[in-house]
Amino acid sequence: MKKQEYIEQDFVIDSLTNSILNTISGDSFQTDVIRLSKQDLKLITKNKAWYFNWKAEYDNIQKEVYKLCIINNINVIQGLLSVSIEKDYVYMNLLESAPFNIGKNKIYEGVAGNLVAYACKISFQKGFDGYVAFTAKSKLIEHYEKTLGAYHFKSQRMIIETKAAKILVEKYFKN
């Protein structure tokens, strides 16, 4: 059996918002997180400046892939999340903001925080008390500790425990 390969995450939490915020107008937009469909794969290719191979994530039956969209606008993907359901926690395989939501000219902020909060929400729904794990790039470990309340476990493994997960879920998913 092939050994699981862990991708070092390098998403940046620009801010924790109640939804996502337009960086130009400051307007807040409510979001929805929906399972990625086969049709969506045409929108998220390397040719369209997406960094990761989302088709491989989608095709892997051990992974669940979700898209973040503004409510009533499900055809514009703001960000993507791939998770695996482990024995007693949720593992974030990949998280990527849409190319237009990265860098100093991004259109929306709060995308990555929203997706991490969704992973925590899944963990609570599965009875895992909000526990989420992921592998971080070394240079971002401190960033994740400060912004997400994640715990640096060992090597580059990060864990979001119940208290921090609850804060994130309550911030983004009030219902």
Image: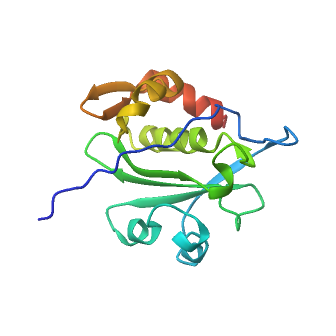
Residue at the far left: name it. Answer: 1
The quadrant the C terminus occupies is top right
Q: Relative to residue 49, is residue 151 drawn left or right?
A: left
Residue at 43 percent across and 68 percent down: it is 58
What is the image's colouring? rainbow
Tell me the residue at 50%/21% (across/down): 146
Q: Quadrant of residue 36?
A: bottom right
The residue drawn where x is 85% and y is 43% is 24
Specify the quadrant of the image occupied by residue 151.
top left
- Depth check, front residue: 75 or 128: 75
Q: Is residue 119 left or right of residue 29?
A: left
Nearer to the camera, 107 or 73: 107
Is 147 situated above or below 37?
above
Q: Quadrant of the N terminus?
A: bottom left
Q: Is residue 25 visible?
A: yes
- Image coordinates of residue 2 in percent, x first then y, are 15, 64
Rendering coords of residue 9 (x, y %): 41, 44
Query: In the figure, residue 28 lies in which quadrant?
Result: top right
How many badges with numbers are in the image? 0
Q: Can residue 130 be seen from the camera position used here? A: no
Task: Please tell me whether residue 82 is drawn above or below residue 174 in the rendered image.
Answer: below
Q: Residue 113 vs residue 107: left or right?
A: left
**In the displayed structure, would residue 69 be above or below residue 91?**
below
Please tell me which residue lies in front, 147 or 133.
147
Find residue 98 and report its horizontal and vertical position in percent.
Answer: 62, 56
x and y percentages locating residue 171 in the rendered image: 64, 30
Instruction: Give the residue furthest to the right.
Output: 25
